[in-house]
Each structure stands twice: as structure tokens, then as C-alpha cells.
Amino acid sequence: MSDSSASFSIKHWALDDRPREKLLQKGKASLSDAELIAILIGSGSRTESAVQLSQRILAKAENNLNVLGKFSVQELMKFKGIGEAKAISIVAALELGKRRAAEDVVKQSKIGSSRDAYHALEPLLSDLPHEEFWIVFLNNSNKILQKEQLSKGGITGTLVDVRLLFKRALELGATALILGHNHPSGNTSPSNEDKKITLKIKEAGEGLDIKVLDHIIVTQTSYFSFADQGLL
């Protein structure tokens, strides 16, 4: 290894600049997002350290981990110094964080407000580049029985099978539903199609005594509640 490349190896950095050692000595909360990513990728290139490379990646993601969570393996590999293995490590770590958030919501599984419903759906939907339609099945105490994807579509919309929805609700013994889908555009306003499918599902549920309590539109930073806006 040449002197120039050796200077960028983590073991040659000053102690405060070594993220692994910093985590051990000062705790995980002391590390910046870039330092945590640097631990994942291990090394940089001949011209920049792992932390500098991580800072460059984060800058491209608007210094926002939710934005970074949308990056594919192929997009990450466009950065000099990031090969397939490093890209996979970043994607896997962000997915684990997303799943941890989802599990935390399940622990407080009773839905009492639109915000509770949003928190149940946000980890599943907020950083997707395409639309998905999910159903939260509830019992008569408004506790979550199951969360399931009903459809997956392009960015312009999804196709929803109402018969399949209620077949599953009856199988689970659900007495109430919360509908949820995402708008990758970031616009929380419901489309006419969103309003139509909500009304269609609500009317179908009335015949089976299964209530639609809300329909949540999820974006990366916010949400829209049909119930809060008096659309149910």
C-alpha cells in the first residue's frame, strides 16, 4: 500500500476520527450518520476516507436517511469507492432500521387516532418509489390483528381487489379496517380515484358489519387522514 492510500486506512486515523473506536469508547449516540455509514463500508478510496465518502453519499441524499433509504444498490454503486458488497451493506442496514421502527409500532398495537394509524403504516410506505395499498385489520378493541399489502403498482396508482380484501378480513375475524397507501410524489392530497375506492370499500364493509375507520395517505414527511377531514 502506498503512503497516500495508507493515510486513508481507518487504522491510521487519529483516535477521534476512527468511528469503530469512537463507538466503543463514547457510545453509539456519539457518532454522526456519516460515521455510522463509514463503519458499514469499512474503507474509502485512495483519495478519501470512509467518513468522507459517507458524507458525500449523504450529501447526495440531502443529508436525510429517509432519502438514502430509497437508493438502490445500483444507485449506490455509482459512487466511487462503493462496490456491490458495500452498497448491499448500506441497503441492508437501512432496511433493518425500517423493520425495527415497524416492530416498535406493533408493540403499541391499539389504534386510537389517525396519528396512531400513520405510525403503523409509515415504516411500510414512506420511502417507496412506487405506490402500494395496505390494509390494517383491527378487532373490536381497535387492536391490530394484521397488516397486509393488498396491491402494488406504478407511481400513478394501484389496483385494489375489494373482494380479496374482505375475504381476508373475514378470515382474520376483523371488525374494522384502516386503509393506507403512499404518494411517492410527496403530495398528501387524495385523488378522485382515492376517494372513489375509499367509498367503495366503506360501502362493501357496511354489508358485512366491518367498519372502515380511516384511510391514511402516507408521504415521506406527512400524512392525510380521510377521517380527520370528514371524508368518511
Image (cartoon, grey):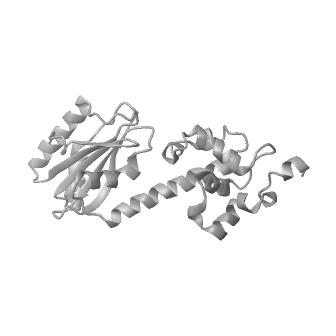
Using the image, determine if residue 149 lies above or below residue 130.
below
Vertical placement of residue 218 versus 137, above or below: above
Residue 155 image point, x, y percent: 40, 33
Q: Quarter-wise, where is residue 193 in the image?
A: top left
Residues 183 and 149: in front is: 183
Residue 210 lies left or right of residue 23; in this view the side is: left
Looking at the image, residue 156 lies above or below residue 172: above
Question: Observer-nearest residue: 214 or 4?
Answer: 4
Residue at image coords 39%, 43%: 221
Number of marks in picture: 0
Q: Residue 217 placed where, x, y %?
A: 30, 41
State the quadrant of the C terminus.
top left
Q: Position of residue 199 (x, y in %)?
A: 16, 38
Q: Residue furthest right?
A: 2
Which of the 4 image quarters holds residue 48? top right
Identified at 18% across, 43% down, the residue is 201
Left or right of residue 8, residue 184 in this image: left
Seen at 51% across and 54% down, the residue is: 95
The image quadrant of residue 138 is: bottom left
x and y percentages locating residue 18 in the rendered image: 72, 60
Q: Residue at x 38, y 35 (%)?
A: 186
Q: Look at the picture and state if 124 lies above or below 217.
A: below
Left or right: where 151 falls relative to 192: right
User: Farthest bottom residue?
Assistant: 25
